[in-house]
């Protein structure tokens, strides 16, 4: 007899029901099928199954009509006569299976990554005797051995600000305040050209634009457009072949005709005090340069933390072999392609499979790292993450959090925060140096044990204060209720 895996919401309902939270003792054995897949063989004695059987009798009694008995009051032996023991035991197994599976997992160190495939191999043949036996095949997080973090060497770029850094920032600022001026010459890289463009596949016109301004070298339109426009003067036309970048014919090669209606160059202002006053709140060029130096130094310092985090992740991936569960990858790829209505796109499937494999490998590595470092996520860290995420989705934080709660996604968000924090905590144990050999202090970005302890203490204090406030409100309510209950009854009005 084969019963499908219990749905996620069934497991959640069970976990939320206080009278079902009691752990049931089950006998289980684990067999490793693959580095990322195991088979649980579970045996449940009749006594442990009996609460589910009793519930099955009660539920069926409410559904059947038996002459001489009120609904819900039909005895078990009559139910067996009417619907059969098979219906009772099937109801009981379906009712208790998710809990038995959960309890079997609780006896192991397994960390499931997907829903199990459950096969019921034996059930009690009649009331009062026998066992429930089932197997559960499930993909799990593999065991991986992480290197000692103290042995990891990381090097990042120095924060020294060079003259080229300031020139680059100054040129970017000049670009913002430059002016476009028409020129009577062939176009060169960096020029702005107003173009008319038409794309044909065969004799069919599949796309066209008119009066669009395009900067040669930006590369944000069609492949080959930069080369086609270079050397073109105003009023001249040329043709070239290129794959289309979007629309219904994306990826298909088209014959493209492009006409330059005007060629303009950007004239940049001189770098002097007048420019400093135009582009900033400073009066002199030296003051502007000093401010740009401070900005670049700050950016480089921040980039050191990002670079160190990425370098640590890359080094761990190079050092550790991370087996990836095939079924989890396939499920994620299917979900992604289904959301885009591209299930038949084999080329895109291959691309998504590579990305999904990498993402799941990173997740397994970071989950293991977070566990090794005993990373804890505070309420403040979770709220900060959720507020930031809500902005990306364009939702109010309260609405976003409520949506996640309704979908049971808060634990997944906690996992995301823990993974991100794991890299920061790991970096605290690593000596990071810059390219000049200087030790880099990243505590501004990765925190410290002291700040974590202080935050935890603050969270505990706030939680205790909230509990005390809730208790006080409850006590006041009880006092009010008692006072209202003991108030003397209003005297009856005097009769005339």
Image (cartoon, rainbow, N blue to C red):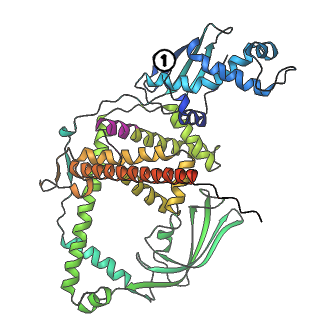
Residue 272 pos. (x, y %) = 24, 89
Image quadrant where one finds the C terminus:
bottom right
Residue located 51% across and 29% down the image:
21
367 in magenta: yes
Q: Nearer the viewer, residue 385 or 221?
A: 385
Q: Main secondary structure of the magenta part?
A: helix
Asked whether residue 446 appears in the rendered view, the answer is: yes
Which residue occupies 62% across, 65% down?
255
- For residue 85, side relative to residue 365 (left or right): right
Neighbour class for label 1 at 10 Å: few (<14), some, many (≥20)? some
| Residue 241 at x, y percent in the picture | 57, 63
Q: Residue furthest front?
A: 496
Where 283 sits versus 125, above or below? below
User: Most extreme residue toward the right, as rendered?
Assistant: 67
Quadrant of the image containing the N terminus: top right
Task: Please give the range of residues in magenta.
Answer: 364-378
Asked whether residue 3 appears in the rendered view, the answer is no
* Residue 198, quarter of picture: bottom right
Q: Quarter of the image holding residue 284?
A: bottom left
- Give the residue displayed 57% in from the left and 27% down from the top: 98
Q: Percent x, y for residue 64? A: 81, 24
Q: Residue furthest bottom?
A: 274
Q: Which residue is mark 1?
A: 25
Judge left or right: residue 209 versus residue 427: right
Residue 143 to residue 425: above or below: above
Picture quadrant where residue 122 is located? top right
Q: Is residue 143 magenta?
A: no
**Residue 35 pos. (x, y %):** 42, 24
**Image height of 337 relative to 169, above or below:** above
């Amino acid at each position: 007899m084969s019963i499908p895996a219990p749905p996620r919401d069934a497991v959640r309902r069970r976990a939320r029901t206080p009278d079902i939270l009691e752990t049931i003792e089950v006998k289980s054995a684990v067999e490793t099928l693959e580095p990322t897949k195991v088979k649980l063989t579970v045996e449940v004695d009749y006594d442990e199954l009996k609460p589910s059987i009793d519930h099955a009798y009660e539920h069926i009694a409410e559904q059947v009509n038996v002459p001489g008995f009120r609904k819900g009051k039909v005895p078990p032996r009559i139910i067996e006569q009417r619907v059969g023991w098979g219906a009772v035991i099937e109801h009981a197994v379906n009712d208790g299976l998710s809990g038995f599976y959960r309890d079997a997992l609780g006896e192991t160190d397994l960390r499931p990554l997907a829903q199990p495939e459950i096969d019921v191999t034996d059930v009690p043949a009649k009331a009062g005797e026998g066992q429930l036996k089932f197997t559960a095949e499930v993909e799990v997080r593999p065991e991986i051995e992480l290197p000692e973090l103290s042995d990891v060497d990381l090097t990042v770029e120095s924060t020294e600000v060079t003259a080229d850094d300031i020139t680059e920032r100054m040129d970017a600022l000049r670009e913002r305040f430059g002016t476009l001026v028409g020129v009577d010459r062939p176009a060169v890289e960096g020029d702005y050209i107003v173009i008319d463009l038409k794309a044909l596949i065969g004799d069919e016109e599949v796309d066209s634009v008119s009066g669009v301004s395009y900067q040669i070298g930006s590369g944000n339109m069609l492949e080959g457009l930069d080369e086609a426009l270079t050397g073109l003067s105003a009023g001249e036309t040329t043709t070239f072949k290129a794959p289309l970048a979007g629309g219904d014919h994306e990826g298909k090669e088209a014959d493209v005709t492009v006409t330059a209606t005007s060629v303009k160059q950007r004239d940049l202002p001189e770098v002097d005090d007048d420019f400093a006053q135009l582009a900033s709140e400073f009066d002199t060029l030296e003051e502007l340069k000093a401010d740009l130096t401070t900005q670049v130094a700050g950016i480089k310092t921040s980039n050191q933390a990002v670079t160190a985090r990425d370098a640590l992740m890359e080094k761990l991936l190079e050092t550790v072999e991370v087996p990836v569960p095939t079924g989890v990858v396939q499920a994620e790829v299917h979900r992604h392609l289904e959301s885009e209505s591209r299930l038949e796109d084999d080329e895109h499937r291959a691309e998504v499979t590579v990305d999904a494999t990498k993402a799941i490998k990173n997740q397994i590595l970071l989950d293991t790292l977070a566990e090794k470092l005993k990373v804890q996520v505070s309420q403040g860290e979770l709220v900060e993450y959720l507020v930031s995420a809500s902005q990306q989705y364009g939702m109010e934080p309260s609405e976003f959090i409520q949506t996640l709660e309704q979908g049971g996604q808060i634990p997944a968000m906690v996992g995301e925060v823990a993974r991100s924090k794991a890299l920061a905590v790991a970096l605290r144990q690593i000596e990071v140096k810059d390219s000049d050999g200087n030790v880099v202090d990243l505590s501004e970005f990765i925190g410290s044990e002291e700040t974590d302890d202080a935050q935890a203490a603050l969270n505990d204090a706030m939680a205790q204060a909230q509990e005390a406030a809730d208790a006080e409100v409850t006590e006041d309510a009880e006092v009010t209720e008692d006072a209202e209950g003991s108030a003397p009854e209003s005297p009856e009005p005097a009769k005339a």
